[in-house]
Amino acid sequence: VQLQASGGGLVQAGGSLRLSCAASGRTVQSNRQGWFRQAPGKEREFVAAITWNGVNPIYADSVKGRFAISRDTAKKTVYLQMNNLEPEDTATYFCARHRGPLSTVATATSYDYWGQGTQVTVSS
Protein backbone atom coordinates (compact mmCIF):
# COMPACT_ATOMS: atom_id res chain seq x y z
CA VAL A 1 0.00 0.00 0.00
CA GLN A 2 1.28 3.45 -0.92
CA LEU A 3 -0.25 6.72 0.23
CA GLN A 4 0.60 9.94 -1.57
CA ALA A 5 -0.31 13.19 0.15
CA SER A 6 -0.45 16.47 -1.72
CA GLY A 7 -2.01 19.91 -1.64
CA GLY A 8 0.01 21.67 1.01
CA GLY A 9 1.34 25.17 0.64
CA LEU A 10 1.64 28.64 2.09
CA VAL A 11 -1.55 30.50 2.91
CA GLN A 12 -2.52 33.52 4.96
CA ALA A 13 -4.54 33.20 8.14
CA GLY A 14 -8.21 32.83 7.30
CA GLY A 15 -7.44 31.12 4.01
CA SER A 16 -8.19 27.62 2.79
CA LEU A 17 -6.36 24.59 1.44
CA ARG A 18 -7.48 21.15 0.35
CA LEU A 19 -5.19 18.21 0.96
CA SER A 20 -5.47 14.96 -0.98
CA CYS A 21 -4.27 11.49 -0.12
CA ALA A 22 -4.26 9.01 -2.99
CA ALA A 23 -3.89 5.31 -2.23
CA SER A 24 -2.38 2.74 -4.55
CA GLY A 25 -1.25 -0.84 -4.38
CA ARG A 26 -3.11 -3.51 -2.45
CA THR A 27 -5.46 -1.18 -0.67
CA VAL A 28 -8.18 -2.42 1.63
CA GLN A 29 -11.21 -0.23 1.18
CA SER A 30 -12.77 -1.32 4.46
CA ASN A 31 -10.30 0.63 6.56
CA ARG A 32 -10.69 4.05 8.02
CA GLN A 33 -8.21 6.64 6.86
CA GLY A 34 -6.99 9.53 8.87
CA TRP A 35 -4.96 12.71 8.86
CA PHE A 36 -2.35 13.64 11.42
CA ARG A 37 -0.09 16.65 11.66
CA GLN A 38 3.25 17.35 13.25
CA ALA A 39 4.75 20.74 13.98
CA PRO A 40 8.48 21.16 14.66
CA GLY A 41 9.35 20.04 18.16
CA LYS A 42 5.89 18.63 18.81
CA GLU A 43 4.37 15.18 18.79
CA ARG A 44 2.27 13.92 15.90
CA GLU A 45 -1.31 15.02 16.47
CA PHE A 46 -4.57 13.48 15.28
CA VAL A 47 -6.62 15.73 12.99
CA ALA A 48 -9.47 13.73 11.44
CA ALA A 49 -10.53 10.28 10.27
CA ILE A 50 -13.26 8.80 8.12
CA THR A 51 -14.76 5.37 7.53
CA TRP A 52 -14.33 3.43 4.31
CA ASN A 53 -17.71 4.50 2.96
CA GLY A 54 -17.19 8.16 3.74
CA VAL A 55 -19.51 8.51 6.71
CA ASN A 56 -19.01 9.14 10.42
CA PRO A 57 -16.11 11.57 10.26
CA ILE A 58 -14.19 12.17 13.47
CA TYR A 59 -12.35 15.39 14.22
CA ALA A 60 -9.95 16.72 16.79
CA ASP A 61 -11.52 19.48 18.85
CA SER A 62 -8.95 21.96 17.52
CA VAL A 63 -10.24 21.65 13.94
CA LYS A 64 -13.97 21.00 14.41
CA GLY A 65 -16.05 23.40 12.38
CA ARG A 66 -13.09 24.43 10.22
CA PHE A 67 -11.87 21.20 8.61
CA ALA A 68 -13.85 18.60 6.68
CA ILE A 69 -12.67 15.13 5.73
CA SER A 70 -14.20 13.28 2.81
CA ARG A 71 -13.50 10.23 0.71
CA ASP A 72 -13.91 9.24 -2.94
CA THR A 73 -13.81 5.45 -2.90
CA ALA A 74 -13.75 5.19 -6.69
CA LYS A 75 -10.59 7.30 -6.82
CA LYS A 76 -9.16 5.76 -3.62
CA THR A 77 -8.58 9.29 -2.39
CA VAL A 78 -9.24 10.98 0.92
CA TYR A 79 -9.49 14.76 1.13
CA LEU A 80 -9.04 17.23 3.95
CA GLN A 81 -10.67 20.58 3.29
CA MET A 82 -9.16 23.14 5.64
CA ASN A 83 -10.94 26.46 6.05
CA ASN A 84 -10.32 29.47 8.23
CA LEU A 85 -6.73 28.39 8.74
CA GLU A 86 -4.80 29.70 11.71
CA PRO A 87 -1.02 30.02 12.26
CA GLU A 88 -1.37 27.20 14.82
CA ASP A 89 -2.35 24.88 11.96
CA THR A 90 1.17 25.15 10.54
CA ALA A 91 2.60 21.63 10.39
CA THR A 92 3.46 18.74 8.14
CA TYR A 93 0.26 16.82 7.43
CA PHE A 94 0.29 13.06 7.03
CA CYS A 95 -2.39 10.67 5.83
CA ALA A 96 -2.48 7.13 7.11
CA ARG A 97 -4.48 3.92 7.11
CA HIS A 98 -6.12 2.93 10.37
CA ARG A 99 -6.01 -0.63 11.62
CA GLY A 100 -7.86 -1.23 14.84
CA PRO A 101 -11.03 -0.50 16.77
CA LEU A 102 -12.73 2.86 16.66
CA SER A 103 -11.44 3.65 20.14
CA THR A 104 -7.88 3.87 18.75
CA VAL A 105 -8.61 6.18 15.83
CA ALA A 106 -6.76 9.12 17.41
CA THR A 107 -3.68 7.06 18.26
CA ALA A 108 -0.86 7.20 15.74
CA THR A 109 0.40 3.71 16.60
CA SER A 110 -2.87 2.20 15.38
CA TYR A 111 -2.08 3.27 11.79
CA ASP A 112 0.04 0.99 9.66
CA TYR A 113 0.70 2.80 6.38
CA TRP A 114 1.65 6.47 6.16
CA GLY A 115 2.05 8.95 3.37
CA GLN A 116 5.17 11.07 3.05
CA GLY A 117 3.64 14.26 4.41
CA THR A 118 2.77 17.62 2.89
CA GLN A 119 3.75 20.94 4.44
CA VAL A 120 1.10 23.48 5.40
CA THR A 121 2.28 26.92 6.47
CA VAL A 122 -0.16 29.56 7.65
CA SER A 123 1.15 33.09 7.95
CA SER A 124 -0.36 35.64 10.32
Image (cartoon, grey):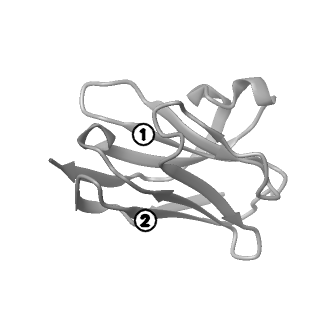
For residue 102, what is the image quadrant? top right
Between residue 105 and residue 1, name the one nearer to us: 105
Q: Which mark is residue 37?
A: 1
Q: Is residue 32 found left or right of 6 in the rendered image?
A: right
Q: Position of residue 84 (x, y in %)?
A: 36, 53
- Please state the horizontal and vertical placement of residue 5, each as a whole percent of the image: 47, 61
Q: How many marks?
A: 2
Residue at the spot 43% in from the left edge and 65% down from the top edge:
6
Q: Please state which of residues 32 and 111 is positioned toward the viewer in this rendering.
A: 32
The amino acid type of the residue labelled 1 equals: Arg
Image disc number at residue 67:
none
Tell me the quadrant of the picture where the N terminus can be found: bottom right
Classify 70 as above or below 88: below
In the rendered image, residue 4, in percent from the top left (x then y), is placed at 51, 63
Dot 1, how many residues are within 10 Å of its Cα: few (below 14), some (14-19), or many (20+)? Answer: many
Secondary structure state at the residue bearing disc 1: strand
Farthest residue in the bottom direction?
74
Q: Position of residue 62 (x, y in %)?
A: 46, 32
- Disc number for residue 6: 2
